[in-house]
Image (cartoon, helix red, strand yellow):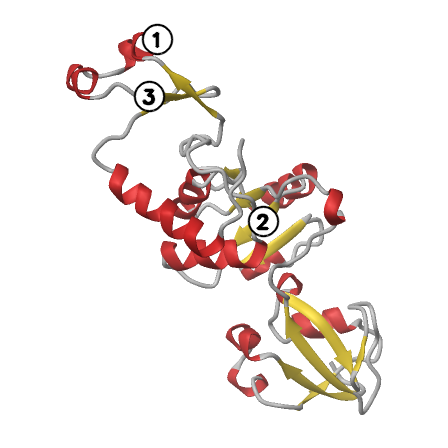
Amino acid sequence: MNGPAIALTLAPELHVFAAPARRGTRVPTTTDGASSLGHVVESAGVPLTEVGRLLVDGQEVPVSYVPRAGESVEVFGVERPQHLPGGPDAPPLRFLLDVHLGTLARRMRLLGVDTAYENEDIGDPALATRSAAEHRVLLSRDRGLLRRRELFAGAYVYSDNPDEQLRDVLGRFAPALAPWTRCTACNGPLREADKDSVGDRLESGTQRSYDVFAQCAACERVYWRGAHHARLERIVSEAVEEFGGVVTP
């Protein structure tokens, strides 16, 4: 860019996206005089999915605003909880996770959050198209993917630790929780199942040791309170205690 110069200030939480030279206050930034402020911010390395308010000389402006020479621009992160298009009458939040977020997908499903996920990499165009078609919030650690214009909505996953990832998503979007109602393998709904109806899917030791079962209505996978239940219960109880929002299915 070689045009009007502005002073750009990124909020501290956005510094992770920017080069060190852009992390200060009122950083001199040259524009081309025609590009929108949204384009300028993305050129600084920040996906627009992570941008909240934009202030120019203290006045809020849209991402389409074209900055002029000498203006001071402040870029803030998204407010939490983040409100998505549709307002109070919008359907419940639904998510789509990038291929590298399998553990996060299973934990969100464990909490009853509608979470689509493919075990194989279907490619950025297909992910963006599905996000738009199904009105799903795309979660990813790929900044390039989050810049695709066709997304319904998106969010960068800041940590590579599943516990921190889950807290970040729940804190940012505050989805309604309905623990133990979704299949962690396919996202289908779970229903109660008696031992006789699922017996042919169980090993003999499981049949002798357990009496309470659930089955996925979509893939027919069977669940019971086995060896890993205590760990899963901890994940559920911690999420409910910290974020609440539990609904009755």
Residue displayed at 37% across by 47% down? 237
* Image quarter of the C terminus: top right
Residue 24 horizontal/vertical position (percent): 58, 89
* Label located before the other in sequence (3 or 1): 1
Distance from disc 2 to disc 3, alpha carbons, whole Å, reads 32 Å
Amino acid bearing label 1? Ser
Which is more N-terminal, label 3 or label 2?
Answer: 2
Q: Is residue 127 above or below residue 32?
A: above
Q: Position of residue 76 (x, y in %)?
A: 65, 75
Residue 141 in view? no
Up-down relation of residue 31 to residue 147 (above or below): below
- Relative to residue 101, is residue 203 depicted above or below? above
Name the foreground residue: 102 vs 106. Answer: 106
**Residue 88 can be seen, yes or no:** yes
Residue 222 quadrant:
top left
Please tell me which residue is depicted at 25% across the width and 41% down the height of the picture: 230
- Judging by the rendered image, the residue that carries numbered circle 2 is 138
Residue 152 screen position, x and y as percent: 69, 48
The residue pinned by badge 1 equals 197
Q: Which mark is residue 213?
A: 3
